Image (spheres, rainbow, N blue to C red):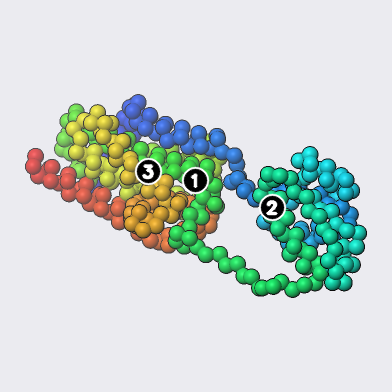
Amino acid sequence: MNLRRMLTIFYKDARDAIRDGRVLVAIAVPLAIGLFYNATADGDPEDLTPTADVAYTAQSAALAEALRESLGGAVDAGFKEAGAGEVRALVEQGEADVGIIAADDLLPALEGGGRPEVRVLLPEGGGAGGELVASAIDPALRALAGQPAPAAVQVEPVPVGGEDSADALAVLGFDTYMVLASVVFLVGMIAVFVVPILLAEETEKKTLDALVMISSYPEVIGAKTLVGVLYTVISVTLLLGMTQLRPENLPLFAGTVVLMSLALVGFGLLFGGFFRNANQLNTWGGFLLIPVVAPALAAGFEPAGWMGALVAATPTGQGMRLAVNGMSGEEVFSDPALSFLVMAAWCAAGFGALLLNLRYRQGRS
């Protein structure tokens, strides 16, 4: 293999790709999708913690403080002290989700073993936050009275659907995850459309035979692979720059994008060799994108069973796992070595099948 000849072909292909409007469209579509998701993002993932405004009388101050500790972070509760009449008015006007009116001797009565009256006001049709606050009043009163809990309750988190359990959406948020999916879409468009179009046009115009006469098939394939990787790196960099997303683990993210690009370009060139012209590729190339993009979208939801095994066996499914780890800087998905191994296997299989096909065609000619 002659490096100078391969670079000469690479420069020619890179210029041809710039002049081809179809290539620019293939790159612009995923860029636009990524920008759309980023522009419509709300920023941080939506906070689903229920909220409640609690109005209480001065006699209920100790109970209100106990409620703060009892609720913890389960409810985003705001507390406001007011007179008994004002507490009721706040609830009636919808400005408070819970009203607490206690007897004057609340704390002494509780400590003495008495049963003081506590009136809890809830608006009809109130929200979940108010209901949660009301349900926490009894445990708070028990704590003020010094009564032990009737049972020692231990809450243990249990993974659902696998050890990773779709933490990607929780860590990154839906919008950032969809931008990453757009990155995979971008890599796929370049591998399935941009690079194969160059090969299909050379096949149609018989320039591929001329190139092989002055070089070799490995040099031609190497040049087109470099074009695919170059356009992938430039396009992904543009997308991340326009969406203002910066991977926390840049080496991992960059290595993932390059290896995923190599794995897909090999098969893209293989399929591109079966089309006689670029129009056929434009017609059928969309179907090739389905198995490229679908595993990346499904990876974050951690599907179980045969579907999960299928996603884990694809280069884009494993690439999306590593991309999530690289973007977040955390090991959201375990076994990164396995992900690299799967992508490397697809890379070797794609280029191996491509070289065998080209040698077969060369032997027939």
| Residue 34 in the image, given as x and y percentages of width and height | 48, 37
User: Would you say 238 lies left or right of 355 here?
Assistant: right
Badges 3 and 1: C-beta atoms under 8 Å apart?
Answer: no
First-in-chain label (3 vs 1): 1
Q: Which residue is mark 3?
A: 293
Q: Secondary structure at mark 1?
A: helix
Q: Nearer the viewer, mark 2 or mark 3?
A: 2
First-in-chain label (2 vs 1): 2
Q: Residues within 10 Å of mark 2 (few under 14, many from 20)?
A: some
Q: Secondary structure at mark 3?
A: helix
Q: Residues within 10 Å of mark 3 (few under 14, many from 20)?
A: many
Q: Which residue is mark 2?
A: 131
Amino acid carrying mark 3 in the image: Val
Amino acid carrying mark 2 in the image: Glu
First-in-chain label (2 vs 3): 2
Q: Label 3, label 1: how many angstroms apart (C-alpha)?
A: 13 Å
Quadrant housing residue 94: top right
Residue at 32%, 45% in the rendered image: 291
Q: How many marks?
A: 3
As drawn, which residue projects farthest toward the left? 364
User: Would you say 179 lies left or right of 156 here?
Assistant: left
Instruction: Decide if residue 202 is in sight here.
Output: no
Q: Label 2, label 1: how many angstroms apart (C-alpha)?
A: 34 Å
Badges 2 and 1: C-beta atoms under 8 Å apart?
Answer: no
Instruction: Decide if residue 43 is in sight here.
Output: yes
Amino acid carrying mark 1 in the image: Tyr
Does residue 261 sit above or below 61 in this rendering? above
Quadrant that contains the C terminus: top left
Q: Which residue is mark 1?
A: 177
Q: Label 2, label 3: how many angstroms apart (C-alpha)?
A: 43 Å
Query: Which of the pair 363/151 is nearer the observer?
Result: 151
